[in-house]
Image: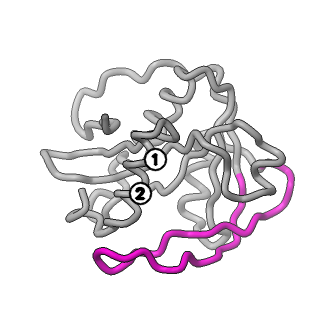
Amino acid sequence: MINAFGEEAFLTDHFHRQQAGRGVLFAAWIKGRAAGVVYLRLEKAEEKKIDRHLKGVPQLTHLEVLGKYRNRGVGRTLIKAVEQHAAELGHERITLAVRTDNDGAARLYKHLGYEDWGHHTVTCRAYPIPAKGWFPKRERETCYVLVKNITSVMPAPAPLAEPAVAAFA
C-alpha cells in the first residue's frame, strides 16, 4: 500500500489509529494491485466547528483513487463500504469534508446522496503527500462539509467483478 500511494506517514498513523479503535482504513484492490484507499474516522473531528455541529458522527476521510483506476467505480465502491460499515456500527449519519475547488469529488458525493450541512465552509487541515519517512506541516484548505443519512443503507450486493474492498485488521 505504501508503495502504491507513497503516503507512509499518513497510512502508518491511520493504521495505528485503527488498532486503537479510532477508525477503519479501507482499501480497494484490482487484480491484486492497490487501487484506492479511504479512512472512516470514528474519533472526535479535528475541526472544532464540525465536532460542535456533528458530535459523534463518523467521518469519511482521505478518499484517494490512483489515476489509472479513476472513473471505474472504485471510489463509489469504497464509499459504499464505509457507509455500510458505519451503519453496521449503529451510526445514523456520516459526514465528510471536500475542498471547495474539488468539483469532481463534490459531484460524486452529491450524486451518492450527501447534502450540505448548512453551516458554511470549514477550514480543514490536509495531509500533503510527504517524502518518505517524515510528516510535514499540514496545509490548510477551505472545505464544504457534507452529511448523509445512512439509516436506510442496505447491505452492499456481492460484486460480480473487481474491485475488491477490504478493511485492514
**Where is mark 2, residue-wise?**
13
Q: Name the one closer to the observer, 117 or 135.
A: 135
**Where is mark 1, residue-wise?**
17
Q: Name the one closer to the observer, 19 or 65.
A: 19
What residue range appears in magenta?
A: 117-145
Sort mark 1 into few (<14), some (14-19) or many (20+) by Cα contacts within 10 Å.
some
Judged left or right of residue 25, residue 51 is: right
Residue 28 coordinates in the image, percent (x, y) = 30, 45
User: Is 125 inside the magenta-drawn segment?
Assistant: yes
In the rendered image, the residue lying farthest to the right is: 119
Q: Residue at x 22, y 33 (%)?
A: 161
> Label 1 is placed on what type of residue?
Arg
Residue 73 coordinates in the image, percent (x, y) = 37, 45
Secondary element under disc 2, as helix, strand or loop, is helix
In the rendered image, the residue lying farthest to the left is: 32
| Contact check, label 1 and label 2, Cβ < 8 Å | yes
Picture quadrant where residue 130 is located: bottom left
Q: Is residue 164 above or below residue 13?
A: above
